[in-house]
Image: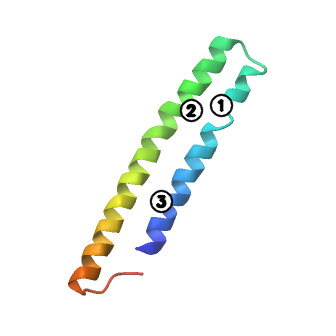
Amino acid sequence: MKVFAAETKRAELTHWLSILPAPLFFLWNPVWVGWIMVLYAAAFNLPIIVVQRYNRGRIDAIVSASNKTGTRSFT
């Protein structure tokens, strides 16, 4: 489970990093195209970021519940 939690962190970071260069499109495109690119980056990356955070929270809850009950967790 710890490996999967780490993968969710990596996936979230990757999607945040893919949003960062969106403002660079203002340098060589008209302003309206730049805003479309920023909106596109947000629309297609933010939902995945939310899902990764949600999954990581659930993984943490499962791991802590299994630690409380003394059952073996998959690490």
Determine crowd level at label 1: few under 14, some 14-19, many 20+ residues with C-alpha closer than 10 A.
Answer: some
Q: Is residue 14 left or right of residue 47?
A: right
For the N terminus, the quadrant is bottom left
For the C terminus, the quadrant is bottom left
Q: Position of residue 14 (x, y in %)?
A: 59, 50
Q: Which callout, 3 or 1, points at the residue further toward the start of the chain?
A: 3
Reading the image, the residue beneath label 2 is: 41
Determine crowd level at label 3: few under 14, some 14-19, many 20+ residues with C-alpha closer than 10 A.
Answer: many
Q: Residue at x 25, y 74 (%)?
A: 65
Q: Residue at x 36, y 53 (%)?
A: 54
Q: Identify the amino acid type marked 3.
A: Thr
Residue 45 to residue 39: above or below: below
Quarter of the figure with residue 22: top right
In contact (CB < 8 Å): disc 2 and disc 1: yes
Query: Which label belongs to residue 8?
Result: 3
Q: Residue furthest left?
A: 69
Reading the image, the residue beneath label 1 is: 22
Q: Residue at x 44, y 66 (%)?
A: 5
